[in-house]
Amino acid sequence: MDRDRILLTPGPLTTTLRTKLAMLRDWGSWDTDFNTVTAGVRSRLLDIIHGQDSHVLVPLQGSGTFSVEASVATLVPRDGHVLVLDNGAYCKRAGKLTQMMGRKVTTIGFPEDAPVSPEVLDQTLAADASITHVVLIHCETGAGVENPLAAVAAVCERHGKGLIVDAMSSFGALPIDARSIRFDALIAASGKCLEGVPGMGFVFIRKAVLASCAGNSQSLAMDLHDQYTYMEKTGQWRFTPPTHVVVALSEAITQFVEEGGQPARLARYTGNCRTLIDGMRALGLKPFLKPEHQAPIIVTFHAPAHPAYDFQRFYQAAKARGFMLYPGKLTTVETFRVGCIGAIGSLEMQQAVNAVADTLREMGIPAAAA
């Protein structure tokens, strides 16, 4: 094969050659040149959400989940009470990590094939004054649902509750404007819609709540307030940073801006999603979600209802043709998932559909049976 396999997953993603080449140089972690890169990344990330006046940006080593855990531990006092709006696997993960950190947590369950309800949130907050913070997954990639960030934020603001947003799979693609949407923390990562490589999360923290975060975290490594304070004082990371990841992200942000920023990225991903769904429907493969609930990030498809279907065989055959798919995350229905994000366009998505068609033929599954 004369090209890298295309990753049709929610991250890691297919990256550009420019992003890959950015990692060929070694950097001193305390050197002024690297500190300048870090400062530039932090500032340009704030620009994406128009958050220079309202928020600070705190980067953190590790996967996105590290930053979700760090955010809850840093933002929520130890006697706080967290409400998790749950319509999928990543919501459940947020509830689990909150509980494991010793914070009181209440979870409200919603169907996996629909957004969470701001109205139910409103009723819950009105009924329980002890709740201090709400956790929302903006794009629940377990099924691919886009949750109503602006409406949830408005309810939290009206009740005076803190909002922690996991925007891991939405940041950089779906519109998020800190001037009109109030959140205490918003979390994303390098290897998602900015099309960098994995290894670094980052958290936007509202300046108005920053001082109250001191001393909340029970973790040294994942104390975002301490990380921020040290970085502001020295320009450096407290502990060894993922230097190659940071410079790759810097280059990826440059390309993001060149492309036209969030609106252009959303347009490309929306085109990818449309090409994918139209092509898969022609093969008899049905999306799990209704169109109005589908974010253009990752699409869940019902597995073919055919005795010859086996996901591992299906995955390996698609991989041999240059495309890496993703297993389903639902517990009640057998599914598989296909990502629409990364440094790809509609041409690559159509090639992926063609690869799936070839794979189904190889497995002896006719389109009508899929």
Image: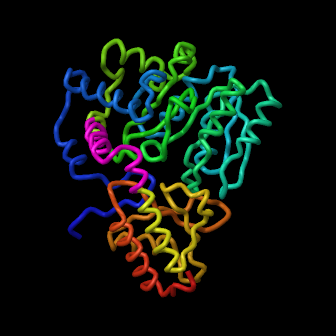
Q: On the picture, is 39 further left or further right than 184?
A: left
Q: How many marks?
A: 0
Q: Quadrant of the C terminus?
A: bottom right
Task: Look at the picture and state if 248 lies above or below 157.
Answer: below
- Quadrant of the rendered structure where residue 49 is? top left
Image location of residue 61, percent across then percent down: 39, 32
Q: Nearer the viewer, residue 222 or 10?
A: 10
Q: On the picture, is 218 further left or further right than 121?
A: left
The answer to whether residue 81 is magenta is: no
Image location of residue 318, percent across then percent down: 39, 72
Task: Look at the picture and state if 289 lies above or below 247.
Answer: below
Q: Residue at x 42, y 20 (%)?
A: 227
- Looking at the image, can residue 94 be seen? no
Image location of residue 64, percent across then percent down: 46, 40
Task: Tell which residue pokes out farthest to the left in this image.
Answer: 25
Image location of residue 155, percent across then percent down: 69, 33
The answer to whether residue 255 is magenta is: yes
Magenta stretch: give its range.
247-268
Q: Main secondary structure of the magenta part?
A: helix
Q: Residue at x 27, y 33 (%)?
A: 243
Q: Nearer the viewer, residue 211 or 245?
A: 211
Q: On the picture, is 161 further left or further right than 361?
A: right
Q: Quadrant of the N terminus?
A: bottom left
- Looking at the image, can residue 322 be seen? yes
Q: Residue at x 25, y 46 (%)?
A: 19
Q: Residue at x 41, y 61 (%)?
A: 8
